[in-house]
Image (cartoon, rainbow, N blue to C red):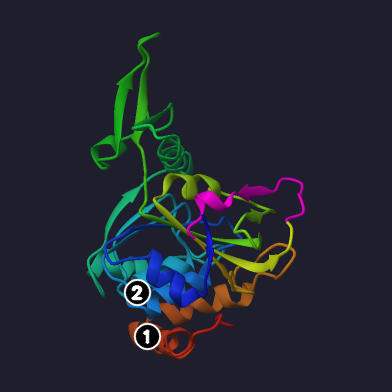
Amino acid sequence: MAEILDLQSAVQRVVHDGDCVAMEGFTHLIPFAAAHEIIRQGRRGLTLVRLTPDVVFDQMIGMGCARALVFSWGGNPGVGSLHRLRDAIENSWPEPLSIDEHSHAGLTNRYVAGAAGLPFAVMRGYMGTDLLQHSPTVATIECPFTGERLAAVRALRPDVAVVHAQQADRKGNVQLWGITGVQKEAVLASGRSLVTVEEIVDELEPRPGGVVLPSWVVTAVVPVPGGSLPSYSLGYSDRDDDFYVAWDAISRDRETFLGWMEEHVLCSSSVVQP
């Protein structure tokens, strides 16, 4: 059952060195506040997993949290490259970084298999590509009914899922709405989960297209208003487009990046206001 904690205590309890950590949120509801607390607590050796690693993982990689990245597209949305990610891959700075790249469908199917307790998922994608030569988590399988050759992707079962949502009730049930990605699948596939929320309410009001995570699949709930900034939480905050543009220059130079992180993340225990 979910326990309502403060952010520092939740990260101390849920995220450990060497963990495989999925941090999901598609376009909005990106768990920046939780990522910053992981950075402040100096977690190391993490395998980071995310459908669209963007600025949140650029920051974590640049601060030395990660040893591996499992992903399905990486970039600064609408702007360009992730310079800290590129520096880690090309120059091993600040640490060497191994990668396992997938399509959105492939990585989603890995989560789905993990959530269902299955060893793998089957899909038609990847056939005819050379990905099988580069990823240890993709193979081919023959359909026992038709003989068709299909792609199989290994189930993904992270140690921890970290997501952001709009609301939780006082029992630890969580609801998110708007553009949803694979938050539900990531939480169900993971051994532990940490959910930051915009607010705690007495009762969750059903929303069109809303996703409810029941308290028994959530380890810790943390109230963090603005916890998705500089991304946004539908109904609570707006995306800071200017920040994403500014990040390109901030992240290009190692010293400039480290100085920004020192000022805005390491020296702060609250939500970063870019």
Badge 1 density bin: few <14, some 14–19, many ≥20, Cα 10 Å? some
Query: Of the numbered discs in the image, which one, if any, rests on residue 216?
Result: none
Mark earlier in primary sequence (2, 1): 2
Along the line of sight, the residue nearer the viewer: 178 or 223: 223
Residue beneath the point at 43% across and 26% down = 124
Q: Amino acid at mark 2?
A: Gly
Kindly identify which residue carries mark 1.
258
Q: How many marks?
A: 2
Query: What are the residue bounds of the magenta stretch?
Result: 204-219
The kind of secondary structure element at disc 2 is helix
Left or right: 225, with 21 as reference point: right
Badge 2 density bin: few <14, some 14–19, many ≥20, Cα 10 Å? many
Left or right: 92, with 20 as reference point: left
Position in image of residue 55 (x %, y %): 48, 69
Position in image of residue 143 (x %, y %): 36, 15
- Image quadrant assignment for residue 90: bottom left
Q: Amino acid at mark 1?
A: Leu
The kind of secondary structure element at disc 1 is helix
Kindly identify which residue carries mark 2.
62
